[in-house]
Structure formats: structure tokens, C-alpha cells
Image: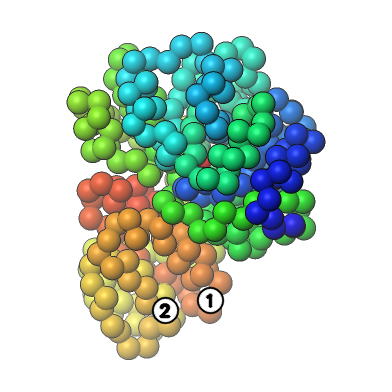
Amino acid sequence: MNISTNCNIIAEELKRGGVVAVPTETVYGLGANIFNEDAIREIFNLKKRPLTNPLIVHIGNLNQLDTLVDNVPDCFQILIKTFWPGPLTILMDKKDSVPNIVTANSEKVAIRMPNHPLFLKVLTKLDFPIAAPSANPYKRISSTEIEHVKKYFDGQLKYALDGGKCTVGIESTIVGLEEGEVFIYRKGGVSKEQLENVLDKKVFYKEVVGKQLPGSALKHYSPLKEMILSDDINKTVLQNSSRKIGILQFSDHLLFNNIEFNFSFKKNLEYASKNLFNYLHFLEQQEIDLIICEKFPSNGIGNALNDRIYRASSK
Ligand code: TXA
Ligand code: MG
């Protein structure tokens, strides 16, 4: 895998029909031209992802939006103005020209404008949008640094664009419209509170576990080690004191004896978001037999973080 920071090389490779790892502010993606069916199939193969699970389409400017949809509802106009470029994906009625393989035969296409300077630069050099799921094999932890992409796909990808460590660190929030109401289908980098503030109305969350909807597989984002969640980190550590443990804690940086690794999220949800997947990548490679993760406070982005650790710890 050639790791590059040269946007011209990456854009040329995408024009040739290649699949390239690209950085975004949320997580790294595996990107390809939405109109090149072979390249899109290659993404599904690389991820070992079923064709029934659609891909998010990434655009670099609003002109590219017109090539994907005929009309943008008023509430989405507001969201686009406020949150793009940024970690918000919007489901909209697609034009016929958007290939069915990208949307898994759905009439809706998921679109976002990512907020990463290098990826945006690449996107504006292209006259087609880029479909990109997260750069991880199906159900594994998403990649938030180029090293993670390398761990998963070295030898399988020709190029990766190195954009440094992802600043948000968890995936975009996915929203859609049902009978005039805005629904969140996947919690992510933009919180429910933020959406309700700008729309000045209630936004709903739709649990879609098990169906082929956004990030909905119950077991997902999973480390290779057993992981359990805790409301009381002291108690949980004590109960498992005979095991080799890695700890992820939010509330306080408590020190324990005989604990192999002990990470603190410093009581800061943004810091936690930026580091959660990094710590999980690290811990899954250590000689431990259990990861204990303290639950996050359920406000703001804490809701999305709890969603991720809940799925990561599902059996
Ligand atoms: O932050 C993100 O959204 C990252 C970066 C790379 O942009 N992408 C990402 O993609 O998380 P992925 O494929 O790992 O997760 C996207 C989710 C999938 O679970 C998929 O089911 C859902 O979005 N999705 C994509 N297109 C859809 C559609 N047309 N209708 C319903 N769900 C869709
Ligand atoms: Mg993913």
C-alpha cells in the first residue's frame, strides 16, 4: 500500500477506477467512483460486506449534489447550511442515474460532504462523487489513523491518502425524513441536541437493530478481545481481578493495581470520541483477555459513544 499525501496522485487513481483509502474527519473510508461498478464491487469485496448494505456518497461541493438528487427538502437545506462540510449524512430521494449497487436498490441515497482538507481537495478535482464506507472489514473497529488502514488492507490497496488522525473519530450521524419528521438512523458526530437546536423542533431516533439500515448490525465496531461495559468501574474491575484487563474510563482516572492498560477519557466527550477507536485498536492487539469500558454520560455525543461501545461489546 502506497501511503501518500499527494491529492493529484489519489485523484488520478480514482479516475482510473481504483479503490483508495481516504481520510475524513470521522473515520477513514474506502473510496471509489460511484459510476464505476467494478470499483464499487471491489469495495464490497475488500470489506467482505454484503451487497445489501448501501454506501455513503461523498461530495466536495453543492454542485455535485444536483447530480444525485432532484430536490432538497427545506429542513435538509438548513442542515446542509449548518453542518456541511461535517459529520452529517442525509438520506434523500435519488436520481435514476445514481447506480443501484451504491444504494443497495433503495430509492434513497445517503450523502455527505466530509470536512477534511485533503479529501475535499481530491473531491473537487473529480467530476464524479465518491462512494466510501468506513475502511474496516465488516463488523471490525473503524480506522481513525492510516496505521489502522494498513493493519487491515496492506497488500490489498494500491494507494491510501494519509490525512493524519481523524478529528471527530466516530462516524457521521445519519438522518432522514419520514412524513415531515426528521429521524436519526445512526447516532454520530452531530448530536440530537444540535439538530433540534437548528431545526427548532423535535428530532426522533429510530432504532433499527438487525435490519439493513445504517450501522445497525448489533455486533459492530468490535475488537478481537472480549469487552464488557460498566456503570461502576471499581466494582467491575474487582469482579474480574483474576483476569488480564485493559480499562477505558471516563469518570476519573482511577488507578488500579495489576491492570495492564488503563486509559482515561479525561471527562471530555470530544476527547473520548477522538480516541475511542484508537484505544480499542491498541487494546485488541495486547496480551489481555478482557476490555472493561465505562459507560459515557448520555448527553451530546455521549449518546453516539454509548451506541458504539454497546455494539462493540455485543456477542
Ligand atoms: O462517517 C461516516 O459516515 C464514514 C465516512 C467514511 O464517511 N462512513 C461510514 O460508512 O460510516 P459505512 O458504510 O461504514 O456506514 C454507512 C451506513 C451503513 O450502515 C449503511 O447501511 C448506511 O450508512 N447507508 C448508506 N446508504 C444508505 C441508504 N441509501 N439507505 C439507508 N442506509 C444507508
Ligand atoms: Mg462502518
In this rendered view, identify the residue nearer to me: 249 or 245.
Answer: 249
Residue 204 in the image: x percent, y percent?
A: 27, 29
Which of the 4 quarters of the picture holds residue 133? top right
Q: Which residue is mark 2?
A: 261
What type is the residue that disc 2 sits on?
Phe
Residue at x 28% of width, y 33% of height: 195
Residue 128 in the image: x percent, y percent?
A: 66, 27
User: Is 19 drawn above or below residue 40 in the view shown?
Assistant: below
In this rendered view, identify the residue nearer to me: 261 or 10.
Answer: 10
SS for dot 2: strand
* Residue 206 visible in the snapshot: no
Distance, label 2 to label 1, CA atoms, is 9 Å
SS for dot 1: loop
Residue at x 67% of width, y 26% of height: 127
Left or right: residue 116 versus residue 266 is right
In this rendered view, identify the residue nearer to me: 137 or 31.
Answer: 31
Q: How many marks?
A: 2
Residue 154 in the image: x percent, y percent?
A: 72, 59
What type is the residue that disc 1 sits on?
Gln
> Residue pushed farthest bottom?
257
Residue at x 77% of width, y 51% of height: 158
Q: Which residue is mark 1?
A: 286
N-terminal label among 2 and 1:
2
Q: Are marks 2 and 1 in contact (CB under 8 Å)?
A: yes
Q: Which numbered tag is attached to residue 126?
A: none
> Residue pushed farthest right?
16
Crowding at mark 1 (Cα within 10 Å: few <14, some 14-19, many 20+): some
